[in-house]
């Protein structure tokens, strides 16, 4: 009877550590270099996602625009926000590229073509990226300490309900299988 | 949206290699290694355990001088279309035949390194990584981002430069072409061949150069008696060259081109 107390205490400690501690410890969180507001830019700068996130002529996706695109407007401080002032002072004036952390960064053996999904399959950006384009702040980048990948690549709550927050192959395969477009490993792997 | 029952026109990518034109220069081997991130040979590598996805073999007719005649035969994965031996033996399902392209693809990340596929391959076209890849300082900047390097302990082989195939598909998407049609592209070896002895294309396209060459006289495949239906067609006007392709031990007693000069 006396032995049950240390056992229960030990089990309780381990459960707290496993449920509350471990999920926090496994991810390393860091803020994005600039507190960027998609919402402000969608209202004032570009109407469409591809105004900044463009395709190159060979079909590759340029991803996050480089500093010269930003400097086109932000050569000097335009607004009144602290974030913009910091951005101009720390990046535009010294011509230093911000080191954005890419939520959707893929493993090096994965080939993902944006244009095949956007132009051919007619998927809209928010199918995978949710309302990221209307967000006011960037989410902190939570890096899995084991795999090195972002915790959450889908910036949409719907996605996370049905699939895991991290990008898994099963999420890709699920849709490809539905579409009858699953042929071989090398469709997506390289 | 793409319909659920997507019908594609399948390609059957293949090559015709004109043995009579091949001078054995080895440009295809170099171009292949550069394209596919095959590292320089490890100091301990020999002809047996080095890596080259395409190997130019030298054969001769076995006659004494002055009747000696030699030929060069580039051998890469033959992309067998029938009962593909390596697919059958793989316990990891790391090898598959893409029904859309006919390419035998291998996933090094799935490979456990048992090397059954190497034993099963009648063409010795598969290579095992005995060492982790290493590039001389500075040379890692020349790595091709479209091809992932492989680690020690896995098997690798030719996949018709599928990094280029991906790029061609992406280009086709950018140009608004439908994805039901096969794309046209050129693997590194075919591009590098200075005398265009290697022709690459869709063998299902009867008007294409490789398909026509495969149907022409003097066309043969390696070890056709095994009925593996390889997609690499060779051509030669010389009878002894064609006969060597069905020898009980192909290239037995022959040696590799430039063996003294390079490893792997």
Image: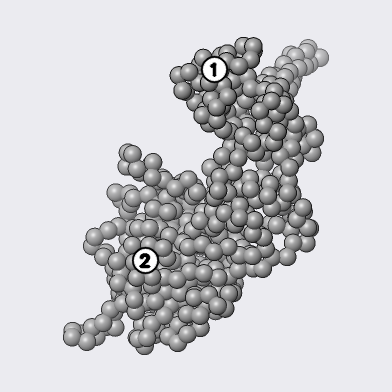
Tell which of A29 and A104 is nearer to you. A104
Return the mark for residue B16. none
C-alpha span from label 1 to label 2: 54 Å
- Mark 1 falls within which chain? A
On screen, residue B201 versus residue A128, left or right, reads left
Residue B24 position (above or below residue A20): below
Question: Residue A41, image x and y in percent?
Answer: 67, 26
* Residue A25 found in image quarter: top right
> Up-down: is B150 above or below B83?
above
- Residue at figure coordinates x 54%, y 53% from the top left: B167
Number of the front mark, 1 or 2: 1
Image colouring:
one colour
Q: Position of residue A184 (x, y in %)?
A: 63, 58
> The disc numbered 2 marks a residue on which chain?
B
Residue at numbered disc 2? B193
Query: Which residue is found at the position 76% from the left and 17% from the top?
Result: A12
Note whether residue A183 is visible. no
User: Is label 1 on the same chain as label 2?
Assistant: no
Residue at (78% x, 13% y) in the render: A5
Q: Which residue bears the numbered disc 1?
A: A76
For label 1, the SS is loop
Q: Position of residue A61 (x, y in %)?
A: 58, 43
- At 70% from the left and 23% from the top, the residue drawn is A40
Pointer 1 with pointer 2, Cβ within 8 A: no
Quadrant position of residue A124? top right
In the displayed structure image, the side of residue B16 where residue A126 appears, left or right: right
At which x and y percent is residue B187? 46, 61
Do we see residue A77 in this rendering?
yes
As displayed, is residue B148 above or below residue B76?
above
């Amino acid at each position: 009877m006396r032995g049950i107390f240390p056992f229960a205490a030990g089990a309780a400690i381990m459960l707290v550590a496993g449920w509350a501690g471990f999920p926090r410890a496994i991810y390393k969180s860091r803020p994005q270099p600039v507190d960027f507001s998609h919402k402000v830019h969608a209202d004032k700068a570009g109407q469409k996602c591809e105004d900044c996130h463009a395709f190159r002529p060979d079909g590759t996706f340029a991803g996050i625009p480089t500093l010269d695109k930003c400097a086109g407007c932000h050569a000097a401080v335009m607004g009144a926000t602290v974030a913009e002032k910091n951005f101009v002072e720390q990046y535009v004036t010294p011509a230093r590229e911000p080191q954005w952390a890419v939520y959707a960064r893929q493993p090096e053996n994965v080939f993902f073509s944006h244009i095949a999904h956007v132009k051919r399959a007619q998927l809209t950006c928010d199918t995978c990226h949710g309302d990221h384009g209307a967000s006011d702040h960037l989410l902190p980048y939570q890096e899995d300490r084991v795999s090195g990948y972002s915790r959450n690549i889908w910036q949409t709550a719907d996605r996370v309900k049905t699939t895991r927050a991290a990008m898994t192959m099963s999420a890709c395969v699920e849709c490809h299988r539905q579409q009858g477009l699953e042929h071989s490993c090398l469709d997506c792997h390289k | 949206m793409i319909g659920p029952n997507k019908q594609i026109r399948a390609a059957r990518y293949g090559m015709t290699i004109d043995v009579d034109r091949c001078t054995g220069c080895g440009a295809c081997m170099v171009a292949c290694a550069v394209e596919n991130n095959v590292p320089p040979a490890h100091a301990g590598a020999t002809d047996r355990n080095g890596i080259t996805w395409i190997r130019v073999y030298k054969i001769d007719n076995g006659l004494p001088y002055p009747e000696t005649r030699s030929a060069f035969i580039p051998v890469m994965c033959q992309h067998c279309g029938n009962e593909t031996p390596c697919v059958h033996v793989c316990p990891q399902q790391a090898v598959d035949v893409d029904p859309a392209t006919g390419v035998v693809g291998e996933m090094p990340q799935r490979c456990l390194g048992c090397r059954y596929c190497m034993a099963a391959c009648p063409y010795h076209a598969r290579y095992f990584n005995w060492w982790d890849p290493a590039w001389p300082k500075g040379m890692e900047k020349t790595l091709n981002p479209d091809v992932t390097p492989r680690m020690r302990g896995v098997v690798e082989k030719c996949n018709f430069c599928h990094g280029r195939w991906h790029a061609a598909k992406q280009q086709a998407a950018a140009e608004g072409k439908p994805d039901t049609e096969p794309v046209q592209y050129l693997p590194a070896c075919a591009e590098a061949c200075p005398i265009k002895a290697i022709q690459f294309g869709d063998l299902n396209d009867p008007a294409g150069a490789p398909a026509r060459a495969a149907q022409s006289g003097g066309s043969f495949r390696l070890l056709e008696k095994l009925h593996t239906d390889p997609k690499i067609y060779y051509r030669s006007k010389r009878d002894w060259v064609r006969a060597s392709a069905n020898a009980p031990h192909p290239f037995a007693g022959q040696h590799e081109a430039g063996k003294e000069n390079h490893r792997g």
